[in-house]
């Protein structure tokens, strides 16, 4: 390999022509099996309308060994041929063993694949790296992308580094944190439609009219290739889990991960495959409906706070269903309330601030166990696609909480005391310690006396100490407080 510098001073790799000849990859229609030229990428067969996919010649790639640093480009030999390697240091993200979360949910083994650790804090940096590399190879000067957030932020950053003009088409509803990233990276932003479906249509028209490189994930099959490296990494970090849970919008991500595991299996690098579970928000679940063969309501209003998966007509629904059915997996929807609760749970127990779409995978765990699809004894990997710092609802919640924090200190302390007593009876000094000694001991006894006067706790003597016990009324008040919190957020 020859290393050199381009005009902007950015490092790039130029590969000798013989390398490209050794890459045994082709673009094939999943429906009619026709084969097409690799580039420029196209997503649909002109003959039958089927989706196109890059395929490897497995027999000729079985001897390939993944070498180099643990990053996205470690798997370059399993990707379509690239000459210019665009990078911001993507990939190689942690696979956390979530011990506290597993204990809380009564699971033996839960892993969180933490894609928030990518350069712009989402799994889409993998996609941006490959798409921008391909655009550079093909001598494009500008790219266009219809997106509801993460890929827009990623592309804007990568285009900024490599000197490409980045045109982003967004819907009216988009997370402000992601929009802020697009703006600071100097993308050209256009608003089109209410949801991402309309933004994608606009991006498709723009690419045809202008000749810009098509970087919309649903319209460029290189997206699947980039995202399959998540499976490659998990296989190296842990092996093959029994279950792999992914949130679904257009449906491409779950298929990407499934394809990655299938390729590793066909290359003889793993001996088993995971069952794939796709998760959607209750207010927008067309793929789950299709899997369960439910009738789609014509007048249904699609709505969810998990904006990253708010997709009315998923273009890759067939790919998602293929992944779920081939893997003997499942599809499930969860409510926005369950998503938000899971978001808090991941943060408090594992120190990972995940966006709502990612948190849906954790919310699904409890439902899967309740319905006995999972027993809790299997190993599970949940994909955390992006950071909660990017999402509108979380930023609003944090701001609101900060404004009301001081006025709510007294209520919060009483609430915490009730929470402590809900778990077990306790006495004043022990309660003070469990509160973290953040208030004076005298204040704890004052709160206990007030809770006692209101009939929320009762006291009794044990071993010479004055113990306190939560009453049924106290439990109802504690439940009501939690309910009010959910309504205010």
Image (spheres, rainbow, N blue to C red):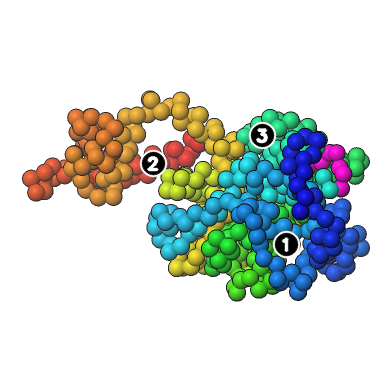
Circle nearer the viewer, 3 or 1? 1
Q: Position of residue 237 (x, y in %)?
A: 55, 60
Which numbered disc flags the more N-terminal residue, 3 or 1?
1
Give me the residue at 55% from left, 41% from top.
388
Q: Position of residue 160 (x, y in %)?
A: 74, 35
The mark found on residue 480 in the picture is 2
Residue 55 visible in the displayed image: yes
Q: Position of residue 17 (x, y in %)?
A: 85, 57
Q: Which residues are magenta?
A: 138-146
Which numbered disc flags the more N-terminal residue, 2 or 1?
1
Residue 289 visible in the displayed image: no
Q: CA distance from mark 3 to mark 1?
A: 30 Å
- Residue 360 falls within the magenta-colored stretch: no
Relative to residue 424, is residue 408 depicted above or below?
above
Circle nearer the viewer, 3 or 2? 3
| Left or right for 265, reference 24 | left
Which numbered disc flags the more N-terminal residue, 3 or 2?
3
Give me the residue at 77% from left, 40% from top.
5
Give me the residue at 82% from left, 41% from top.
143
Mark 2 neighbour density, 10 Å: few (under 14) some (14–19) many (20 or more): few
Q: CA distance from mark 3 to mark 2?
A: 38 Å
Relative to residue 336, is residue 320 depicted above or below?
below
Q: Which residue is mark 3?
A: 181
- For mark 2, give the secondary structure: helix
Name the foreground residue: 75 vs 251.
75
- For mark 1, give the secondary structure: helix
Give me the residue at 26% from left, 45% from top.
421
The part of the image, by quadrant, that contains residue 225 is bottom right
Q: Which residue is mark 1?
A: 78
> Given contact means CB atoms under 8 Å apart, are the residues at marks 3 and 1 in contact?
no
Name the foreground residue: 438 vs 2.
2
């Amino acid at each position: 390999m020859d290393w050199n510098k381009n005009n902007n001073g950015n490092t790039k790799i130029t590969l000798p022509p013989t390398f490209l000849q050794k890459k045994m990859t082709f673009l094939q229609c999943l429906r009619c099996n026709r084969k097409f030229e690799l580039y420029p990428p196209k997503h649909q067969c002109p003959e039958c309308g089927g989706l196109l996919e890059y395929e490897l010649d497995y027999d000729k790639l079985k001897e390939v060994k993944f070498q180099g640093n643990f990053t996205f480009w470690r798997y370059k030999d399993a990707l379509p041929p690239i000459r210019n390697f665009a990078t911001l240091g993507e990939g190689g993200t942690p696979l956390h063993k979530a011990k506290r979360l597993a204990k809380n949910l009564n699971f033996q083994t839960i892993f969180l694949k933490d894609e928030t650790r990518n350069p712009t804090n989402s799994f889409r940096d993998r996609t941006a790296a490959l798409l921008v590399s391909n655009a550079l190879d093909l001598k494009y000067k500008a790219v266009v992308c219809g997106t509801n957030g993460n890929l827009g932020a990623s592309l804007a950053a990568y285009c900024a580094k490599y000197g490409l003009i980045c045109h982003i088409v967004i819907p009216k509803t988009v997370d402000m944190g992601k929009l802020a990233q697009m703006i600071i990276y100097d993308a050209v932003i256009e608003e089109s439609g209410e949801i991402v479906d309309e933004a994608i249509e606009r991006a498709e028209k723009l690419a045809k009219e202008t000749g810009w490189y098509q970087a919309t994930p649903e319209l460029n099959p290189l997206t699947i290739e980039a995202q399959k490296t998540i499976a490659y990494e998990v296989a190296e970090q842990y092996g093959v889990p029994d279950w792999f849970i992914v949130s679904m919008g257009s449906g491409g991500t779950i298929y990407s991960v499934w394809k990655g595991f299938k390729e590793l299996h066909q290359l003889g690098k793993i001996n088993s495959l995971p069952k794939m579970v796709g998760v959607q928000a209750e207010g927008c679940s067309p793929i789950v409906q299709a899997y369960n063969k439910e009738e789609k309501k014509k007048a249904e209003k699609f709505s969810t706070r998990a904006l990253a998966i708010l997709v009315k007509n998923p273009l890759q629904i067939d790919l998602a269903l293929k992944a779920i059915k081939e893997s003997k997996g499942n599809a499930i929807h969860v409510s926005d309330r369950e998503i938000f609760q899971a978001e808090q749970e991941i943060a408090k127990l594992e120190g990972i601030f995940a966006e709502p779409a990612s948190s849906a995978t954790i919310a699904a765990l409890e439902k899967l166990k309740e319905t006995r699809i999972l027993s809790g004894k299997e190993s599970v990997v949940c994909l955390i696609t992006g950071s909660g710092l990017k999402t509108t609802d979380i930023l609003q919640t944090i701001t609101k909480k900060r404004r009301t924090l001081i006025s709510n200190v007294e209520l919060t302390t009483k609430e915490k005391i009730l929470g402590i007593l809900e778990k077990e009876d306790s006495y004043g000094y022990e309660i003070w310690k469990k509160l973290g000694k953040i208030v004076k001991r005298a204040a704890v006894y004052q709160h206990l006396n007030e809770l006692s006067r209101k009939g929320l706790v009762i006291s009794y003597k044990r071993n010479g100490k004055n113990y306190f016990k939560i009453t049924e009324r106290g439990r109802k008040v504690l439940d009501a407080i939690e309910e009010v919190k959910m309504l205010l957020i």
